[in-house]
Image (cartoon, coloured by chain):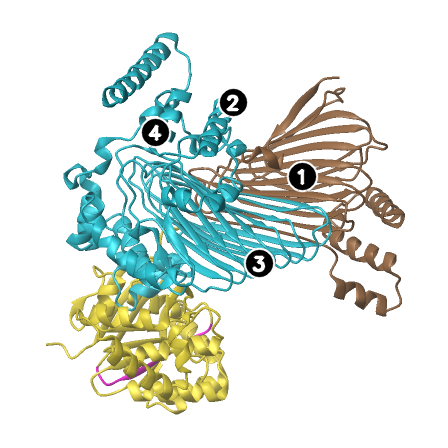
């Protein structure tokens, strides 16, 4: 039995159906173990969101080379919903609006799909409302259509709500904290903290280091041009905070030059 | 002279609405034009119609070519004008058209744009202005055949006096036009209680992978806008004129021929003052 | 006497055959509907004299009118054999075994209880319905509400019927209105006196009509001042009819300050030509609410019309149309603003798939001098594949400068991003698509009585099953 929850080896990927194929991820390797919190830093266009989408199996991306494994199982043959059922969760950078489907109905359908068991309406509603309260989401949002007319902050909290209800083994958080005010960041951070335990793991993309102050970060990866160019512990966050990506880019270019 | 059908709606509907076809007296033929824009070429063409009769214009824009077309109908008096424009766009070809309908006692105009090649783009801006007992009949049809084409049809109009106007605007997505987008918007300002205003925005689709949107808004001038302008010292007529001019500017601003643009501005100003 | 009657019947039979033979020989499109046929229907129904006159007038109009020059192709409708549709058909009583396989399968999947299956197939179950009907009726009767079938209404409330019958939909309206006027049979009659609020929705479901009455039924509803009613038309389950033409007529009179909600889910069998005419006249401060779902039939032409006749009269129209394989569903609405301060809201959703053609067609007319008019139209179309069609054809005809009219329409397909999002939450691809489609029609579903909304969802599920992904 492998102790690795997620293992990505030499991953090359591009946008699907586009010619000529232009690699967005160019030989990326990454390993996440249970109980860990990983952070991915990188400038815009470095491939961060693509990585998240590829892990989740977005049909808009194509894996050209390399492998992805979750708990020892190859991910590539699996559809997104099968990956979700294995325990992977993606918090979207821009959550989709789905008119006509209420938050409660969607989350209940999701619970049912994930567990394969019928979900009792009333007990699920109680559970939903208690988590909503924790995230300071008004209970009335349960009857609103999925993300329709939600503010940016409300959409993000709705994602964390799903994270807590879904209890996945691996949470991919794609800029879940962006566009939030200070209070909202606190709420999101608390939510992630509550979710995290020694059995599950988080992979976080963020621009905002404030959220990381609340979380015990194990590893930091710096993504540049579709590759990881630097890795380290939490101290790397401070360094980039201070110096920006410039120094790392220089170092990486130097490395390549050799 | 006998009456004839100048143009027809792409899909018929209830007869009592009177929008299925455009009928007018037969008239004299004006010289027609046939234009060919070569691959990669950019051509500007400005046509001002100032004579009664019927006129036609056909243009073909080859791959990557671009046609900037301005047509202005300023036929004086109460005569008849029939205009028929047909444009074919090859792969990556573009059309930027501005059409102004402001003259003649009765006008019937039709424009058909065929976006045949992949990635063809057309944006058509229409301005209509009806006053007195002018009758305007317009039939604009954008046929999207190629993949990833984009058609825009933006229409601004004002109606005064006892004007009677029909505007039909069609977005027609043909099978295979995957990835195509089409937008149509008509905004009509009505300035008189005796106007008849008919709007027919059609959207036809035989392809799922498209995005189409059309919208029509018809109403009188926004009272709060008028009030605002009047609180700045303008009288009612001036305020109305300003609001209508503002509505027309998106079209007028696109007319590059300075003299023609000014002529139109003056013309509309005068007609509004008379109303 | 008995003998005479028999001869009479035989004569008609012979006449019919003669006409048909003659027409075939002459290659002429003469409608086989004769005065004799109409007189026969009238006498069998024991019409009052004035009704017979109206039928004959309608017949005369019918002969002068042509088929509509627009809309779906009706050429498969054999007008020469219109009599075959008109003539009561013994088979109409219907046995469950006669119901086509696909419809029976639908029933099974819908989980319609056996009792309801019987009620669809046979006359016997009508008694079950009658019980329910009567229990509703007793409480209403005390308040003066009349709810009965058209034939009874014609006998017991002749004056009311005479004043209103085909006043909103005159036979000269179109060929099928004229046909209806000549051969109508069956239907519902509702009268709600001033100030009475009917709390329970009345359902014509409970009023299965006599055999043969199905295709030309007439619904007449009169709401007096400040009364209210919710009327649900039709059986929610798929209707099966051996004939293939339905030309019903619905006339709704909404009095001053009255409120009427008229809900329909139509799911005719796929061989049906559904050419139904529905119209409402709304007086001052009155409200008509249409909730209309079109799922069945091969061809539909259905555009409920609201005439806003009194000041402040309002219309709310909510419709959904789902055109699947072999269907051409041409639906929509029309509104006539004939008085000041009238307002209308039209909101529709159409879906097309598997080669189906859905058309949204509407007309908004503002008559001259009507001021402070508000009308907004919103229609959204969803296409599920690239072999289907979806067309939108609204007309706005506005006279005067005191109307604010807005129209908006979109067309598109299921967002792949939304599908991905739902899949990321563990929901399978097929179910994700079905959820999005259900969400698309949700604004309509939520206007329906619960059991109808549930059934609409089931119908969508059945339609989507195995065709997506």
Badge 1: chain ID: B
Q: Which one is closest to the eye, mark 4 or mark 1?
A: 4
Q: CA distance from mark 2 to mark 4?
A: 19 Å
Which residue is disc 4 drawn over?
C86
- Mark 2 and mark 1 in contact? Answer it, CB < 8 Å: no
Q: Which residue is mark 2?
A: C64
Q: Secondary structure at mark 4?
A: helix
Give the CA separation, mark 4 to mark 3. 37 Å
How far apart marks 3 and 1 lie (CA) works out to: 35 Å
Q: What residue does disc 3 label?
A: C256
Residue A187 picture location, percent across and down: 41, 87
Q: Are marks 2 and 4 on the same chain?
A: yes
- C-alpha gap between disc 2 and disc 1: 30 Å
Is residue C429 shown to the viewer in this render?
Answer: no
Rendered shade, chain B: brown
Span shown in magenta: A34-43
Q: Earlier in the sequence, mark 4 or mark 3?
A: 4
Task: State the separation of the CA atoms marked 2 and 3.
Answer: 37 Å
On the image, the x and y values in percent for residue B167 come to 65, 40
Q: Say which colour chain A has.
A: yellow
Q: Mark 3, mark 1: which one is toward the viewer?
A: 3
Q: Is residue A172 above or below residue B130?
A: below
Which quadrant: the N terminus of chain B?
A: top right
Helix, strand or loop at mark 3: loop
State the residue in front, B99 or B164. Answer: B164
Check residue A37 for magenta coloring: yes
Residue that carries the numbered disc 1 in the rendered image = B166
**Nearer-the-camera pick, B226 or B49:** B226
* B53 to C189, vertically: above or below: above
Camera-nearest label, 2 or 1: 2
């Amino acid at each position: 039995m492998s102790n690795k929850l997620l293992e990505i080896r030499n991953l090359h990927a591009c946008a699907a159906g586009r010619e000529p194929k232009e690699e967005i991820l160019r030989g990326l390797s990454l390993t996440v173990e249970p109980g860990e919190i990983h952070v991915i830093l990188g400038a815009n266009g470095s491939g961060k969101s693509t990585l998240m989408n590829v892990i989740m199996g977005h049909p808009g991306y194509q894996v050209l080379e390399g492998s992805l494994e979750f708990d020892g199982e190859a991910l590539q043959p699996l559809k997104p919903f099968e990956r979700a059922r294995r325990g992977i969760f993606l918090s979207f950078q821009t959550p989709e609006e789905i008119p006509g489907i209420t938050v409660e109905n969607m989350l209940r359908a999701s619970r049912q799909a994930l567990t394969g068991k019928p979900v009792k309406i009333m007990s699920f509603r109680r559970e939903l409302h208690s988590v909503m309260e924790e995230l300071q989401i008004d209970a009335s949002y349960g009857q609103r259509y999925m993300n329709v007319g939600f503010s940016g902050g409300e959409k993000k909290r709705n994602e964390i709500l799903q994270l807590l209800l879904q209890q996945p083994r691996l949470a991919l958080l794609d800029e879940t904290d962006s566009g939030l005010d200070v209070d909202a960041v606190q709420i999101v951070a608390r939510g992630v903290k509550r979710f995290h335990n020694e059995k599950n793991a988080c992979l976080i993309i963020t621009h905002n280091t404030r959220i990381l102050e609340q979380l015990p970060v194990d590893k930091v990866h710096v993504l540049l041009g579709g590759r990881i160019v630097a890795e380290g512990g939490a101290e790397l966050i401070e360094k980039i905070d201070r110096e920006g990506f410039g120094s790392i880019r220089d170092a990486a270019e130097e490395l390549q030059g050799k | 002279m006998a009456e004839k059908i100048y143009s027809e709606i792409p899909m018929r509907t209830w007869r009592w609405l009177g929008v299925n076809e455009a009928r007018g007296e037969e008239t004299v033929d004006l010289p027609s034009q046939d234009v060919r824009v070569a691959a990669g070429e950019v051509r500007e063409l400005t046509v001002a119609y100032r004579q009664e009769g019927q006129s036609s214009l056909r243009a073909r824009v080859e791959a990557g070519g671009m046609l900037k077309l301005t047509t202005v109908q300023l036929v004086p008096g109460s005569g008849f004008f029939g205009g028929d424009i047909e444009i074919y766009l090859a792969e990556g070809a573009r059309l930027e058209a501005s059409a102004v309908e402001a003259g003649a006692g009765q006008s019937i105009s039709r424009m058909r744009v065929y976006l045949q090649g992949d990635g063809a783009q057309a944006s058509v801006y229409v301005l209509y202005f009806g006053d007195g007992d002018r009758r305007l009949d317009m039939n604009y049809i954008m046929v999207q055949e190629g993949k990833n084409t984009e058609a825009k049809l933006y229409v601004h109009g004002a109606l005064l006096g006892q004007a009677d106007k029909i505007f039909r605007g069609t977005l027609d997505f043909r099978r295979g036009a995957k990835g195509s987008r089409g937008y149509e918007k008509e905004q009509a300002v009505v300035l008189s209680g005796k106007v008849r205003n008919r709007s027919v925005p059609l959207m036809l689709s035989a392809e799922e992978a498209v995005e189409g949107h059309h919208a029509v808004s018809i109403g009188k001038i926004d009272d709060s806008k008028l009030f605002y302008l009047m609180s700045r010292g303008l009288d009612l007529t001036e305020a109305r004129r300003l609001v209508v001019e503002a509505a027309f500017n998106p079209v007028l601003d696109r007319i590059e021929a300075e003299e023609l643009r000014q002529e139109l501005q003056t013309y509309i100003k005068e007609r509004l003052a008379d109303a | 006497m008995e003998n005479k009657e028999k001869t009479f019947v035989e004569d008609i039979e012979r006449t019919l055959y003669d006409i048909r033979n003659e027409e075939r020989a002459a290659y002429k499109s003469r409608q086989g509907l004769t005065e004799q046929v109409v007189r026969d229907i009238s006498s069998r129904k024991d019409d009052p004299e004035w009704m017979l006159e109206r039928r004959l007038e309608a017949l005369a109009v019918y002969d002068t009118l042509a088929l509509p020059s627009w809309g779906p192709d009706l050429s498969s409708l054999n007008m020469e054999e219109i009599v075959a549709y008109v003539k009561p058909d013994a088979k109409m009583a219907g046995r469950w075994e006669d119901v086509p396989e696909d419809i029976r399968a639908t029933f099974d999947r819908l989980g319609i209880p056996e009792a309801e299956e019987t009620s669809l197939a046979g006359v016997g179950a009508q008694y079950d319905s009658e019980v329910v009907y009567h229990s509703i009726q007793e409480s209403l009767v005390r308040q003066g509400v009349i709810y009965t079938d058209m034939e009874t209404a014609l006998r017991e409330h002749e004056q009311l019927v005479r004043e209103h019958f085909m006043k909103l939909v005159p036979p000269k309206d179109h060929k099928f209105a004229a046909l209806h006027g000549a051969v109508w049979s069956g239907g519902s009659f509702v009268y709600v006196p001033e100030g009475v609020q009917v709390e329970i929705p009345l359902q014509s479901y409970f009023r299965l009509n006599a055999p043969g009455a199905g295709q030309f039924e007439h619904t007449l509803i009169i709401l007096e001042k400040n009364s209210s009613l919710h009327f649900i038309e039709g059986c929610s389950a798929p209707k099966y009819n051996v004939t293939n033409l339905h030309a019903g007529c619905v006339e709704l009179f909404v009095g001053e300050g009255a409120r009427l909600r008229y809900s329909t889910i139509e799911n005719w069998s796929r061989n049906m030509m559904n050419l139904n005419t529905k119209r409402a006249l709304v007086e001052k401060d009155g409200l008509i609410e249409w909730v209309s779902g079109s799922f069945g039939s091969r061809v539909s032409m259905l555009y409920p019309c609201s005439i806003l006749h009194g000041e402040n009269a309002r219309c709310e129209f909510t419709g959904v149309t789902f055109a699947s394989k072999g269907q051409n569903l041409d639906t929509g609405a029309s509104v006539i603003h004939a008085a000041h301060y009238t307002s209308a809201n039209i909101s529709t959703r159409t879906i097309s798939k598997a080669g189906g053609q859905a058309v949204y067609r509407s007309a908004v007319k503002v008559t001259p001098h009507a001021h402070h008019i508000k009308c907004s139209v919103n229609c959204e179309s969803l296409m599920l594949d690239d072999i289907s069609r979806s067309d939108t054809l609204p007309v706005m005809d506005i006279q005067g400068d005191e109307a604010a009219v807005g129209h908006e329409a979109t067309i598109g397909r299921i967002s792949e991003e939304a599908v991905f999002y739902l899949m990321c939450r563990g929901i399978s691809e097929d179910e994700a698509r079905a959820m999005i489609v259900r969400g698309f029609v949700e604004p309509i579903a939520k206007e329906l009585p619960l059991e109808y909304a549930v059934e609409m969802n089931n119908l969508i599920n059945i339609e989507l099953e195995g065709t997506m992904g």
